[in-house]
Amino acid sequence: MTASTMTLPGSPHLAYRGPQLFIEDLAVADLARRFGTPLYVYSKASMLAALSAYQRALKGRDHLVCYAVKANSNLAVLQVFAQAGCGFDIVSSGELHRVLAAGGDAAKVVFSGIGKTRAEMRHALEAGVMCFNVESEAELELLSDVASGLGRTARVSLRVNPDVDAGTHPYISTGLKGNKFGIAHERALATYRRAAALPGLEVAGIDCHIGSQITDTTPYLDALDRVLDLVEAVEAAGVPVHHLDLGGGLGITYTDETPPSAETLVQQLLARIDARGHGHRKVLFEPGRSLVGNAGVLVSEVLYLKPGEQKNFCIVDAAMNDLARPAMYEAFMGIVPCVTRDDVPATHCDVVGPVCESGDWLGRDRDLAVASGDFVAVLSAGAYGMSMASNYNTRGRAAEVLVSGSQAWLIRERENPAELFAAERLIPQG
Ligand SMILES: Cc1ncc(COP(=O)(O)O)c(C=O)c1O
Ligand SMILES: N[C@@H](CCCC[NH3+])C(=O)O
């Protein structure tokens, strides 16, 4: 990198070299011209660097990092993690199909989620997943029934709800009493006893996931203490608990957040585990956002600049159907030009998409020096971007590209809007 390199917050593999924004060794504007927009672009090096931060901190420990597939479920992304030895955290049969298609190992898969169906349980048992993270007593009973019917044993870990405030957006907080997730702390001991008694089940561990985009270690440590209290009570009742699954949730930098690094978080948690005499247990993590979030950008073309009396709008060709986070959580996502220019003045504007909703915005009150036809990059869009995309307004979903050094692979083709209704049927006439 040259002296004029300027790295963007949270994204070591994204930097300006002179006026051009580069991802690894490729100019983002060139990728936009080559593959069209809207376009998701991911850096492979960035994903691997994020993963190795967890792996470094866990070195020498019996551990498994299970990438949370929901954050970005593109097959090539899963392939990168599978090849790096990762396990996977899935929440549906569809995600299991993806993991297996990408070369992932079923024996390294944990199956989370509060609404697993009988068919999904059967699929996961037949594939041989490592563990089911069970979220209710009713689910436990059904899993026992399905496993016994198949003549198999389901390894289970109970997801407990520690009632800890992760200090994050209410829609992405999961570890509070009022959330739908996990088994209440007070019910957990009785549920472990039940799990140990039911046929077709084998207690393997304990699980906890308190929310997403967490920027402080304190809630993790509080949740861990509650989990370890439970493990002690459960083992005193004669039910061995082998692994501790501490979930995902570590935040990333979108703007000025300063989350702990994965190393810091893991080191603090391991220190507490050791201090409380649980150092012999296998430790699992389920990170999603922190592995892929800062690895990706959403590239979009500026269609029109629309000055207004109260507001100026920069209308781009990406919209809430491509990236739902701003519309859904009022989330801030950085937006930068792919080529900086000083021949046009910066406009104070809202960056909006073409979808027919006033909630269709990607950024509010931004200062951007761009003209129609320029490309902009929405930063930190690697997590919960494409995986939450829809066809609203019958818009085809974006293409995706994976970059490694100076190579770029098209890892998902752009959807053709003319083919989006292929599965629909007209009713017979007459
Ligand atoms: C059970 C479970 N594990 C892991 C994750 C991944 O979370 P994050 O992407 O915040 O790391 C989630 C999503 O919040 C989840 O619900
Ligand atoms: N979709 C959320 C994260 C959800 C985490 C899943 N439990 C986001 O974009 O921030």
Image: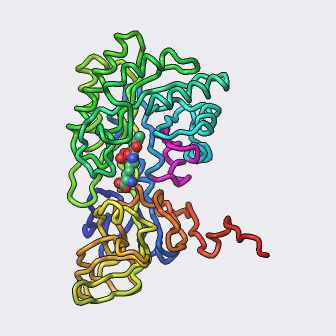
Image quarter of residue 229: top left
Give ligand 1's quarter of the image.
top left
Q: Residue furthest front?
A: 430
Q: Is residue 378 visible?
A: yes
Q: Using residue 321 as the reference point, say whether residue 271 is left or right of it.
A: left
Identify which residue, 81 or 302, lies in the foreground.
302
64, above or below 273, in the image? below
205, above or below 46, in the image? above
Residue 376: x percent and y percent?
Answer: 36, 75
Give the colour scheme shown. Answer: rainbow
Quarter of the picture holding the C terminus: bottom right
89, above or below 193, in the image? below
Quarter of the picture holding the N terminus: bottom left
Residue 78 sits inside the magenta stretch: yes
Q: Residue at x 31, y 83 (%)?
A: 313
Image quarter of residue 302: bottom left
Q: Residue furthest right?
A: 430
Residue 249: x percent and y percent?
Answer: 33, 44
How many numbered markers are drawn? 0
Q: Using residue 55 as the reference point, say whether residue 106 is left or right of it.
A: right
Residue 66: x percent and y percent?
Answer: 45, 38
Identify which residue, 2 or 166, lies in the foreground.
166
Residue 113: x percent and y percent?
Answer: 46, 40
Identify which residue, 80 or 358, lies in the foreground.
358
Magenta region: 72-94
Q: Is residue 49 visible?
A: no
Q: Residue at x 39, y 19 (%)?
A: 190
Residue 61 sits inside the magenta stretch: no
Q: Residue at x 24, y 41 (%)?
A: 165
Q: Residue at x 26, y 49 (%)?
A: 168
